Image (cartoon, helix red, strand yellow):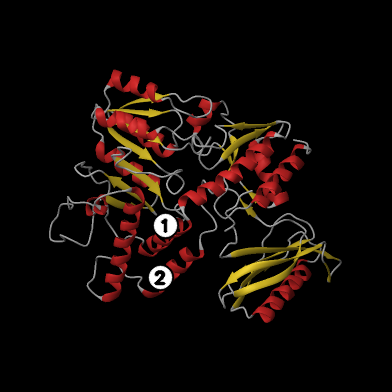
């Protein structure tokens, strides 16, 4: 059993699917059960509803959906109702999605024609976020949405304090000192570009692997046209890299930089970062880690792992909003800035400040989003990264076991365990990955990622190029029932003609 039961989402997405017969008669297809939903605020019930475009009388369908919306408005004191016609090719189906934020526990009867929407694409972006993330963003935007570091008035100081405290939270999580060595970015991709373009010069050599994301591969490919040499170490069929293979290449070519991903976004393989970092440290090689799939999932200590440059997004397992991320640069290591401009300090000078973080932070930052990122990190610390990891690993083990029992399914990567992160990739005989993703969305309301996942080299390495895989990535708010529902959906798809 997956014992960490905080899948009681702070924001509950509760979906009602109903069947409409004739022009105006409402008739539920199923009445399944009553469910108690934990709720936590006394306002802001938002009801989104819409009719199906293919219905013989869309206005009738929408009218019935509106009646349901107003029922919830009156019964539970909602602040507003939003009518949204979602045009989907599902005959006779109207969908109402209710977002609850109310106080106490509420028992509702579920009318199900289709299951809840199940989000299993957390390797791309975690969703939903903890309620505190939404609340902090909203509070920041409404109360101190001024430019941090650009004014001496109170709300500008408040915005600057959020920036500073978020920087400190990141520093504490990754054992970074001082926190000024952290520069905020829009995402991991921006951080990787800043690091690679700011560090490498013509004739420098770089060692990387065949399992990397395009966020690494494309900047390096560009820099190859400017005199940089790139050497790729081939991973095995599970996406795992042998440290000795990296050592051998490094001894042969004497690189300036080794850059690897901590966890493959295709197979979930966890690389031996500590061993590789120690080797690089002993041989005077700069070690850069892409932690897009590991930050918030696995413990990362930049000192113990000898990480000179660390890049991570805020919107994945750190549970922050999109548009957030960071770049850590070891003290004493200098990068050239990718972007130059206003920093809020040394404004009389024409040249870019040389000290971190201003060296790499130009322009107005997204302070309200960083307030959300701080809340996401606080949530991880309060719940315990090890508890979240245990819960997600349990879901992955259920998923791996369930998929392994389905004829025609092939899973890629290591089995869930210490060398595996937070996702499982698979293919299904006689169905393209696009077909599987389409069926899951349209027939079962399940969201997964399909295709190459922006990592074509990884798929060439494991033998799934060019079709790619179906990638399933549970998050900390998914439940065992979500996994069981997903497995049943795949079993149903296997019976469908390709």
> Tag on residue 328?
none
Q: In which quarter of the image is the C terminus?
A: top right
Q: Nearer the viewer, residue 111 or 360?
A: 111
Q: What element does badge 1 sit on?
A: helix
Q: Which of 426 and 231 is in front in this view?
A: 426
Dividing the picture into quadrants, the one containing residue 227 is top left
- Visible residue check, residue 210: yes
Q: Tell me: 488 left or right of 245.
A: right
> Tag on residue 377?
1
- Residue 328: x and y in percent read 30, 46
Q: What element does badge 2 sit on?
A: helix
Which residue shows up at 42% across the image and 47% down it?
Answer: 295
Q: How crowded is mark 2: few (under 14 residues within 10 Å), some or many (20 or more)?
A: some
Q: Tell me: 309 left or right of 268.
A: left
Q: Nearer the viewer, residue 298 or 88?
A: 298
Q: State the residue position of label 2.
A: 141
Q: How crowded is mark 1: few (under 14 residues within 10 Å), some or many (20 or more)?
A: many
Taking 63 as reference, is 498 above or below it? Answer: above
Which residue shows up at 28% across the image and 39% down it?
Answer: 308
- Visible residue check, residue 316: no
Which residue shows up at 64% across the image and 42% down it?
Answer: 398
Which of discs 1 and 2 lies nearer the camera? The answer is 1
Taking 325 as reference, is 490 above or below it? Answer: above
**Which residue ends up furthest to the right in the rendered image?**
22
Q: Which of marks 1 and 2 is nearer the N terminus?
A: 2
Q: Distance between the residues labelled 1 and 2?
A: 19 Å
- Residue 231: x and y in percent read 36, 24
- Residue 403: x and y in percent read 68, 37
Q: Tell me: 435 left or right of 422.
A: right
- Residue 120: x and y in percent read 60, 48
């Amino acid at each position: 059993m997956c014992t960490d039961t905080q899948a009681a989402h702070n924001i509950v997405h509760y979906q009602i699917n109903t069947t409409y017969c004739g022009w105006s008669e409402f008739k539920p297809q199923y009445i399944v059960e009553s469910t108690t939903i934990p709720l936590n605020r006394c306002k802001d019930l938002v009801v989104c509803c819409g009719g199906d475009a293919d219905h013989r009388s869309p206005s009738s369908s929408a009218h019935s959906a509106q009646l349901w919306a107003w029922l919830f408005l009156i019964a539970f004191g909602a602040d507003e109702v939003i009518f949204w016609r979602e045009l989907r090719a599902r005959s006779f189906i109207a969908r109402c999605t209710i977002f609850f934020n109310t106080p106490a526990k509420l028992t509702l009867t579920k009318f199900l024609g289709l299951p809840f929407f199940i989000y299993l694409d957390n390797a791309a972006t975690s969703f939903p976020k903890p309620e505190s993330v939404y609340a902090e963003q909203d509070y920041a935007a409404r109360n101190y949405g001024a430019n941090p570091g650009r004014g001496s008035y109170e709300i500008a100081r408040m915005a600057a304090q959020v920036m500073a405290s978020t920087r400190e939270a990141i520093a504490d999580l990754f054992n970074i000192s001082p926190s000024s060595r952290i520069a905020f970015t829009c995402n991991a991709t921006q951080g990787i570009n800043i690091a690679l373009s700011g560090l490498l010069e013509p004739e420098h050599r770089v060692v990387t692997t065949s399992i990397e994301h395009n966020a690494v591969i494309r900047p390096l490919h560009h820099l190859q046209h400017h005199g940089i040499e790139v050497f790729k170490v081939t991973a095995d069929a599970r996406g795992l890299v042998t440290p000795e293979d990296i050592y051998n290449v490094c001894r042969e070519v004497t690189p300036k930089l080794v850059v690897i991903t901590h966890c493959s976004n295709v197979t979930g393989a966890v690389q031996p970062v500590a061993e590789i970092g120690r080797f690089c440290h002993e041989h005077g090689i700069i070690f850069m880690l892409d932690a897009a799939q590991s930050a918030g999932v696995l413990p990362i200590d930049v000192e113990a792992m000898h990480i000179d440059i660390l890049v991570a997004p805020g919107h994945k397992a750190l549970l922050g909003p999109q548009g957030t991320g960071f770049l850590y640069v070891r003290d004493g290591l200098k990068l050239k800035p990718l972007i130059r401009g206003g920093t809020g300090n040394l404004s009389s000078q024409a040249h870019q400040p040389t000290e971190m973080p201003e060296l790499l932070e130009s322009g107005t930052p997204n302070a309200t989003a960083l307030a959300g990122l701080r809340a996401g990190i606080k949530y991880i610390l309060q719940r315990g990264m090890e508890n979240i990891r245990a819960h997600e690993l349990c879901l992955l083990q259920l998923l791996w076991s369930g998929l392994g029992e389905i004829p025609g399914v092939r899973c890629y990567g290591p089995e869930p365990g210490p060398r595996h992160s937070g996702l499982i990739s698979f293919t299904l005989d006689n169905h393209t990955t696009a077909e599987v993703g389409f069926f899951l969305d349209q027939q079962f309301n399940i969201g997964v990622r399909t295709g190459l996942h922006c990592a074509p080299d990884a798929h060439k390495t494991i033998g799934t190029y060019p079709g790619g895989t179906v990638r399933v990535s549970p998050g900390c708010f998914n439940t065992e029932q979500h996994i069981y529902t997903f497995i049943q959906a795949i079993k149903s798809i296997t019976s469908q003609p390709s």
